[in-house]
Image: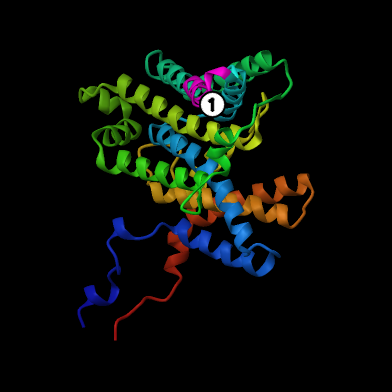
């Protein structure tokens, strides 16, 4: 028997599914068995709706993490976008209102990129500062109170509409993941993001335009966040200065659970998808179990850390399994 046939991997490394896929599948089966109503069609759609907005914004977070940075201002940016959207006069029309909010988020992403890339300020400091500034501007514009939006079918369409029976947010998330895959795997800009994230000094010495590459990454990340902010505002039907305060932290958790190293330079779309689905399932399960809010946070925190630890030790655990041999 040829040893290479008996002990070799069944698939090349680049084609093997990430460990988080097996972890997500195991947790899905576990919740089906233990959580009442988790497996109903209505609840599965609810999980996917939760995952949709988180997934779209996590695409932006993934780009920033691959670049070796981190983004804490997504939640505040979405809140500011919701306020800007409802402040546009109704005479201007719903598309103009959505465009105003989206442009505000993209402008924040570009400002973050400029501060990080041009002035060399650490991403943590830049995005935390932007979080506070965007939150303050949103509260100032709204007077600290939510502002009801003039609801219409067109305003509600991004969150409640369907295309061929599929909810629009889910379709938007699928499109966002497809765009991210094309950017990372099939575009020159995506390859440059990996190079800069892996070693910015070497990239600069190699003659790459690191400043423009980083700036472009933060701008594209802002665009993903803008799409998520529009859908979120459409769903709540108001401009809220405290909208989605944990959004940035949930996107970071989704990327970390998915296996994206926070040191930058690596990461795949499939990892982001699995991480987002896992966070959405956990969020839905603790609600269905009717746990108190404090207990929900504790359980979520423990499960997030446990999933990341299990994934980190996945290779060591796999070594404990018996070797597969062909007859």
In this view, which residue lies farthest toward the bottom? 327
Residue tagged by mark 1? 94
Residue at screen point 57% across, 62% down? 28
* Percent position of residue 27, x then y: 58, 62
> What is the count of numbered marks?
1
Q: Nearer the viewer, residue 82 or 209?
A: 82
Magenta segment, prevailing SS (helix, strand or loop): helix
The colour style of the image is rainbow
* Percent position of residue 304, x then y: 59, 49
Q: Nearer the viewer, residue 221 or 69?
A: 221
In the drawing, does residue 86 fall left or right of residue 6? right
* Percent position of residue 111, x then y: 45, 16
In the drawing, does residue 219 fall left or right of residue 140? left
Q: Is residue 193 magenta?
A: no
Point out the image quarter for the N terminus: bottom left
Of helix, strand and loop, which one carries label 1? helix
Q: Is residue 305 visible?
A: no
In the depicted structure, whether residue 290 falls above or below residue 168: below
Q: Quadrant of residue 159?
A: top right
Q: Is residue 194 visible?
A: yes
Q: Quadrant of residue 8?
A: bottom left
Q: Is residue 93 magenta?
A: yes
Residue at screen point 60% across, 26% down? 82
* Percent position of residue 142, x then y: 68, 17
In the drawing, does residue 134 fall left or right of residue 144? left
**Mark 1, residues whose alpha carbon is within 10 Å: few (<14), some, or many (≥20)?**
many
Residue at screen point 63% across, 33% down? 244
Residue extent of the magenta highlight: 91-104
Residue at screen point 51% across, 63% down? 25
In the drawing, does residue 112 fall left or right of residue 31? left
Point out the image quarter for the C terminus: bottom left
In the depicted structure, whether residue 3 falls above or below residue 104: below
């Amino acid at each position: 028997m040829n040893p290479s046939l008996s002990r070799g991997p069944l698939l090349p490394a680049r084609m093997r599914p990430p460990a988080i896929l097996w972890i997500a599948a195991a947790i899905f089966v576990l919740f089906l068995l233990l959580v009442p109503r988790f497996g109903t069609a209505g609840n599965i759609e609810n999980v996917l709706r939760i995952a949709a907005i988180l997934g779209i914004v996590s695409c932006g977070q993934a780009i920033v993490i691959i670049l070796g940075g981190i983004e804490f201002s997504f939640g505040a940016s979405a809140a500011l976008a919701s306020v800007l959207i409802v402040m546009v006069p109704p005479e201007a029309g719903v598309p103009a209102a959505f465009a105003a909010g989206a442009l505000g988020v993209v402008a924040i992403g570009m400002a973050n990129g400029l501060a990080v890339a041009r002035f060399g300020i650490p991403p943590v400091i830049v995005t935390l500062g932007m979080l506070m500034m965007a939150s303050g501007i949103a509260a100032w514009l709204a007077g600290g109170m939510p502002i009801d939006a003039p609801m219409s079918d067109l305003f509600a369409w991004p969150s409640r509409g369907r295309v061929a029976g599929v909810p629009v947010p889910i379709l938007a998330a699928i499109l966002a993941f497809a765009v991210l895959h094309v950017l990372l795997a099939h575009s020159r800009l995506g390859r440059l993001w990996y190079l800069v994230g892996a070693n910015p000094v070497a990239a600069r010495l190699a003659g790459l335009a690191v400043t423009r590459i980083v700036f472009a990454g933060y701008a594209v990340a802002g665009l993903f966040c803008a799409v998520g902010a529009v859908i979120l505002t459409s769903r709540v039907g108001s401009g809220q200065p405290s909208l989605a305060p944990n959004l940035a932290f949930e996107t970071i958790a989704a990327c970390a659970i998915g296996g994206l190293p926070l040191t930058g330079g690596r990461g795949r779309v499939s990892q982001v998808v699995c991480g987002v689905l896992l966070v959405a399932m956990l969020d839905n399960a603790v609600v269905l179990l009717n746990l108190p809010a404090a207990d929900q946070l504790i359980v979520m925190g423990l499960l997030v850390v446990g999933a990341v630890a299990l994934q980190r030790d996945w290779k060591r655990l796999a070594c404990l399994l018996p070797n597969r041999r062909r007859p």
